[in-house]
Image (tube, grey):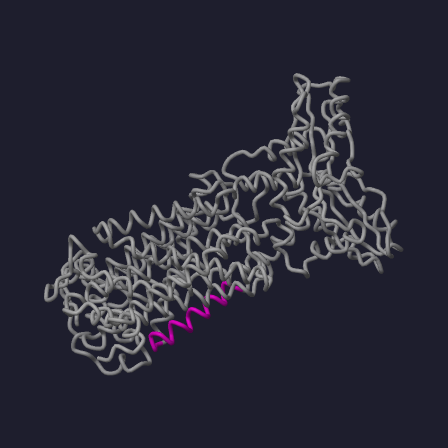
Amino acid sequence: MATGGVARLVCGRRSKWIVLALWIGILLLTAPLAGKLTSVEKNDNSAWLPGGAEATQVADLQRQFQPDDIAPAIVVYERTGGPLTPADLAKARADVAGMKTVDSVVDESIIGPVPSTDKAAIQVIVPVKITDDGWDALPDIANAITATAENGAPPGLDVYLAGPVASAADSAGAFAGIDGTLLYTTLAVVAIILLVTYRSPVLWLLPIITAGVALTSSQAVIYLLAKYAGLAVNAQSAGILTVLVFGAGTDYALLLVARYREELRRHSDRHEAMQFALHRAGPAIIASAATVVVGMLCLSLAELNSTAGLGPVAAIGIAVGLGAMVTLLPALLVICGRWLFWPVRPRYGTAEPTATGLWARLGGRVARRPRAVWIGTAVVLGAMALGLLQSNAVGLTSAEQFTTEQPSTVAEEALARHFPAGGGQPVSVVANASSAEQVSRELAAVPGISEVAQPVQKGGLALIDGTLADPPDSAAAQRTVEQARKTLHAIPGADAKVGGYTAVVVDINDANRHDNRLIIPLVLLVVLVILGLLLRAIVAPLILIATVVLSFAAALGVSVLAFRYLFDFPAEDTSFPLFVFVFLVALGIDYNIFLMTRVREEAVQHGTRRGALIGLAATGGVITSAGIVLAGTFAALASLPLVAFVEIGFAVAFGVLLDTLIVRSVLVTALNLDVGRWMWWPSKLDRGPREEDETPLSSSEPELTH
């Protein structure tokens, strides 16, 4: 069988050195650019929204009243039990003068000190200008403001820093070193699993080196697109990029190395063995990567900029990872030779051990009663999916976003004890100046608005700020904003728009819900089409899609129960279902592709039922190893102190293991055995009865074909 020019080019006796030299050149060019990726990340919530969102429109219109982007830092002085002393008030007044000297503080706009009505606390609102460094500079400013307030505070007077600046400082601390933490955790997980899988002290290095080169190259491409093409990148998408490149890339490496090791037993020349391995495993690897890439690109249609940006980021990572795994890795493998597999070298002419291994025996047991097996497995998965009844994907408040208590959260609680909870982050309304008085009256009458400031008019527009009675990220505050929009939009000729921090949260949640409804069915359709083209059938793709959806539902159900009763998380982020769905469906279908392409290859010679057993025996070990690697890399997300990352990491890791160990090995195999040749309808494989498909199968081990 011809192996194709591409396979010969990648691992030829001379061309392998050219491939290696090309990748070394790419690495030297991209490494400096990859290190700049964090400089183009945008991690503030408002930057995630599309331009058409109402909160975004208000933010743009506000620049007419205040040309610079301003974020408030709220200094809270609290004397437990009260009342405040004259020394407390004197300290707050002195601090105002000191805070005016802090870089980026808009000194003429500082508000306070303002004592609370219960005379037990003081607040000072310190406006901070967002500089060219963006929100990355806010932690240092927050530290300077806090140091000024804490220095020389009278005994018994507690000092807190609340507001967006404080929240940004805590977020920066949580994201600090995220790239390094994820990278090193992922490297450790992959290295350990590869060592166990290969039982070789050297071989595991090549997939990791190749994945590292792919990650660096993809980071450089993403940096250039973010810098010059407006691609939205944040710490979340950058972190997921690391996990995807190492997880999916190592999966492709495992499949290729397994097929290469198989061919080394059939060919004395390692170059020829790699050519056959690439020719036979290459289509499945490329189809799997294409499925993930197209699935991720579906995210580009999202309303939310952060979700839309994740699509190209992930797609670039997968595409570059694929390129490295089918060019650089084969070149490295044939350059190094068979000694890489020491101490278990695949010697020419020896028997293939998977033919009598664990997965061959499992296939024999499933073959005894395949219909009972797949029905029973489906019922169990359906029962696991019942956990979805406790799903609460309504978003996370500031206090719920972190796995540990943060200073800004404690500060917000102190602020709420003595002042209107939304005082530092008002509802901002921009309307036509001619309707300013009516808009003010209607806004003041909205339940949940404690007070309304005097309108500020400029250029035919009016800016009206309303103070929320509830914490600005609470469900109650969001309902207040929704009611305010409903009320103010109904005023004729006012053209009122409601923005502010809470409105940003409302618009983000609305965009996430829209994206869930649009992208989830679209991804299913895209994956179905790709499977149909790859397998040249209709029945098999429909069955495979059904198994993946069932696996997703079961994984999500168990994850939700774990969040409630194991992790004590009260809710999930509104983007959680979409992210987990895309990762599990796009990545989970990989294993079905790996299995079914081998089953189809064997079915041509042996029939579907015998081919199903041979395919399971041949791919069971490598697919399980690949699933464990991918699950381990996503589990690395749980090393971060952010609830959203922990939730995504746990759900995807559990879902991948469930799909690898149960759905693919048991459910899909049982369906192959029960449905038989009809799996390939309407292709030629389903036409005419085959002796192998009509004869009952025994539990004897299948033989792998050459």
- Prevalent SS, magenta region: helix
**Which quadrant: the N terminus?**
bottom left
Q: Nearer the viewer, residue 78 or 538?
A: 78
- Residue at the image point whose x is 52% and y is 47% from the top: 572
Residue 659: where, in percent of width, then height? 34, 57
Vertical relation: 406 (above or below) 309? above
Vertical relation: 162 (above or below) 606? above
Q: Which residues are magenta?
A: 519-537
Residue 424: where, in percent of width, then height? 72, 38
Look at the image and say whether residue 536 sits in the magenta stretch: yes
Look at the image and say whether residue 448 sits in the magenta stretch: no
Is residue 165 shown left or right of residue 374?
right
Query: Would you identify the image quadrant in which residue 224 lies?
Result: bottom right
Q: Nearer the viewer, residue 670 or 302?
A: 302
Vertical relation: 499 (above or below) 139? below
Q: Nearer the viewer, residue 36 or 572?
A: 36
Vertical relation: 60 (above or below) 703? above
- Residue at the image point whose x is 71% and y is 28% from the top: 418
Query: Would you identify the image quadrant in which residue 621 lies?
Result: bottom left
Residue 498: where, in percent of width, then height? 74, 52
**Which quadrant: the C terminus?**
bottom left
Is residue 50 shown left or right of residue 24?
right
Q: Nearer the viewer, residue 452 or 237?
A: 237
Residue 662: tell me if it is visible: no
- Residue at the image point whose x is 26% and y is 79% from the top: 685
